[in-house]
Amino acid sequence: MQAEGLNVLSCFDGLSGGQLALKKAGIKVNTYYASEIDKYAIAVARYNFPDTCHLGDVRKIDTSRLPQIDLMLAGSPCTDLSFAGKQKGLVEGEQSSLFFDWWNLVQELKPKYIFLENVRMRREYKDKISKTLGFEPVAINSSLVSAQSRYRLYWFGVRVGNKYIDMPINQPKDKGIVLRHILETQSDNSTETHATPKQIGTAVDIRGYDIIKRVYHPDGKSPTLTTMTGGHREPKIVCGAYRGRYYKDGVRQDQFGSVAGKTKQMLELRKDGKTNTITTVQKDNVLAKDEVYWRKLTVLECERLQTVPDGYTEFGMFHRKYPDISMSNEIKPVSNSQRYKMLGNGWTIDVIAHIMEGLR
């Protein structure tokens, strides 16, 4: 690593989790260039890291104006690759093809280090990415450092000659963090309408377990989220998701082909003290008390699940056209819907920081 710090180019920068991770890992950055098109994510990045050089669309970067780049980061769009997505694969003209735009920049700029994050995907897609980069990824579940189950693939490479080889990535130590560690004691969702068991139908967890199983801390030493004090049982708080399901004679039918018009939204509960993967769709993560829907996760809780600092996404520095350039920046609150979206699209910072420590 250069004594004066790294020049970094982060493509699909989002809320600038790359800067958060590098800072947390103690990696000095000289100049951080960010390519992003979402105005809300850009505004949050500008508010928290005002020295960021924003370059806009990854397909329109003028590389002639860039210095030697030492590290290129990317979390390329996953909609076409994810098992939960459209399953189109790496196809020209689709969002997933932006990966190749990033790779073309890598070939042109020849940074010493490259880093790519993406979702769990079909082997043929993963193999295509790995063949392009020249090395295999390492899979890490964010549950090791967070109360969120988020399985992701990470490619981290160093340039040797005209190719890249993988940098060592060790699994993070399990911090034993569970849902109760990140919940707000008071939330802003108290006015929500609560569903009843009749409204949500039969609650069956994703792995097929029944809903009466207790929730235990990952170290197996003590029950989590359920206590017995003086004969009074505290409400058991777990995380779940609404899924379209169709059961016949107690057997799921929706996974065996088309059952159009027969599926119903049902609450499925986790049993490991973690949340599901944070996405841009809030029904993928809801809280339940005693197996009954209680409320959705708050934005602050989602920040904690992504190990983003509390309140990081609350404000943004927005650009506006104004005759007096000194007044062209306006600090405004960011709507909850946009905060949920950027967090769902973002990285688990502590995982990235753990990997970036390899640059020391």
Image (cartoon, rainbow, N blue to C red):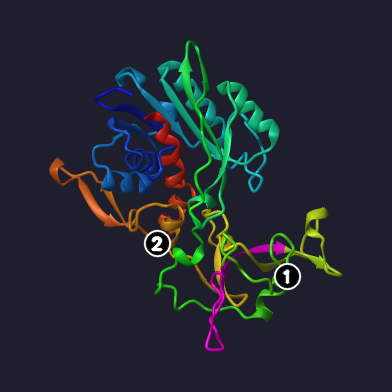
Label 2 crowd (10 A; few <14 / some 14-19 / many >=20) = many
**Residue 135 visible:** yes
Name the residue beneath numbered marker 2: 300
Q: Would you say 203 lies left or right of 275 here?
A: right
The residue under the point 43% across, 50% down is 342
| Residue 37 locus on image (x, y percent) | 40, 39
The residue under the point 41% across, 55% down is 338
Q: Within the image, what quadrant is residue 269 found in?
A: bottom right
| Residue 97 locus on image (x, y percent) | 56, 30
Q: Secondary structure at mark 2?
A: helix
| Residue 292 locus on image (x, y percent) | 61, 77
Label 1 crowd (10 A; few <14 / some 14-19 / many >=20) = some
Which residue extends farthest bottom? 231
Label annotation for residue 37: none
Q: Which residues are magenta?
A: 222-244
The kind of residue on which mark 1 rests is Asp
Residue placed most toward the observer, 273 or 262:
273
